[in-house]
Image (tube, coloured by chain):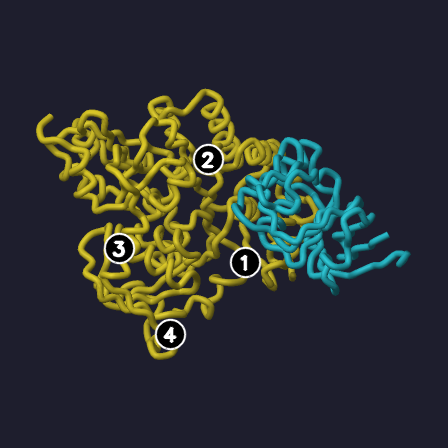
Amino acid sequence: MRGERAYIGRGVAKFVGEGEALVSKQGISFFGGVDPKTGIVREKGHDLCGADITGKVLVFPKGKGSTVGSYVIYQLKKNGHAPAAIVNIETETIIATGCILAEVPLVDKLEKNPLKEIKTGDLVLVDGKTGKVVIR
Amino acid sequence: MHLSKVEEEMLSGGSGKATEKAMQLLVALGDVLGAPRLIPIVSAQIAGVSYGNIGDAGMELLEDWASQGAKTQVKATLNPAGMDLDRWKEMGVDEEYHAKQLRIIKAFEMMGVQATCTCTPYLVGNKPRRGSHIAWSESSAICYANSVLGAMTNREGGPSALAAALTGRTPYYGLHLKDNRKPTIVVDVKARLCTTYDFSLLGYTVGGIIGSGIPIFRGIGHPDSDRMKIMSAALAASGGIAMFHVEGVTGEAEGFDFNSVERVCIGQKELEASREKLTSEGDPDFVCIGCPHCSLEEMKDLARMVKGKSVGRGKALWILTSRGIYKRSKEKGYAGVIEKAGGKIFVDTCMVVCPLEKAGYKHMASNSCKAVHYVPSTSRIKASVMELSSALEKMMEAGQ
């Protein structure tokens, strides 16, 4: 047991959320890549294909694809299938816009690489207000 | 980011829930993009209108904001919708799509956005002055506004442009700063440019080769606004180009030292390679013109080209323009000539954002590289780029 670890990053969407981590090494396009009605990843060949992001702390490098992806994050929230929070290595405007509209906490630019520090299944708290990410 | 008193008030909900959200969005994006503060704008152009693109998610967000009393603070106009708001049935659009598209338009109108539904707002009254700060989405209009109008905008997305309209502000970075608007690459053009189509090919070729940055063109003479309009669209489709200069024409690069940046040369061979890339096998069965939306001048040219002819059996000619230009071309008689020849003029929409596949055609021809670039992926039909006169030749027969 390594015990509780905390990392400081940049709080982009200033909300707080907690959940089980789901880690991907690949970029995510919410438009076309995630089903807004179920929260299941649909992109063929993606390392999360078939996984359910509902209530998870989703950890991935950054967003990609169409800017409509912002609206998909909002729709996931309305359908009860949004992730509890998102942690990016360095975010971009599609994910940032979606998270702010949908009130999903978003933190990026952690002092250490989140893809290495966080493992799928870890219980993670993301505080977008302070930029703090705590792995329990 | 530094915020003024008024901006702080918006951020803390003093102007309502939706404006609070809009301000949150701009502040967060400003932080991500490294903007020290916000800057007031005079105009917004909002993309993300087609139901086919934004879906139920976008519709619900817009309705939520409208019902929370959000109101635009500056002149704000809309990008094309997914259908002609009156003649949607002729386009093959179904009832559900139609109903939801109307809900989207209504939500925008409730917020004070003018439902111009065009990618050429500058032709229908949203024409900001040189040097003014604006927040536009729609990549072709952004490139035209920065380059030809001399207004200043970054490449905004639908939500950030709407947020800018609702707060009257946008993050101060990128192309809002004079220093960032200088040419980054010289493009020496050795190809022969005779028609609007040639300028589309040139834009597409250069966008593909340089990918990003701000080109300055030499050797292309004094292109008119229609040529710069179609070139803007192509530059922004094959590359992420938000601005260009034309030596002696666009006015923001006077005194520029051409030896201070790298240089590319574009000849006939490079244009030919783009044409090949944008050509599908087989014969097109319909022609679609108006990407970006046709100007009055282009409607006049089209009328001249189809006068006395008629669209052949099993073929079709679609012309896309704004409601405003359609009205004026009816008054001038151009629309009547085109319609008499069997051409269909649709407004409020375009081939890139409407469900084109539902119209039943298999292979589109257009003089616009942007249209041909996107249509195979948005509508899963074939597309080929060609000279306007050649495209019309394939569709039209003599006599009426």
Contact (Cβ within 8 Å) of mark 4 with mark 3: no
- Which residue occupies 35% across, 67% down? B252
Location of the C terminus of chain B (image quadrant): top left
Chain letter for mark 3, please. Answer: B
Q: Which mark, by number, is residue B199?
A: 3
For the residues beneath circles 1 and 3, the answer to whether they share a chain is yes
Q: Which mark, by number, is residue B50?
A: 2
Chain letter for mark 2, please. Answer: B
Tag 2's secondary structure? loop
Residue farthest along the top direction in this orientation: B95
Give whichever of A126, B223 is nearer the camera. A126
Residue bearing mark 1: B39
For the residues beneath circles 4 and 3, the answer to whether they share a chain is yes
Is A123 left or right of B217, judged from the image as shown? Answer: right
Mark closer to the chain start, 4 or 3: 3
Chain letter for mark 1, please. Answer: B
Question: Is residue B19 at least partly visible in the picture?
Answer: yes
Whole-percent x and y of residue A74? 63, 38
Q: Which mark, by number, is residue B85?
A: none
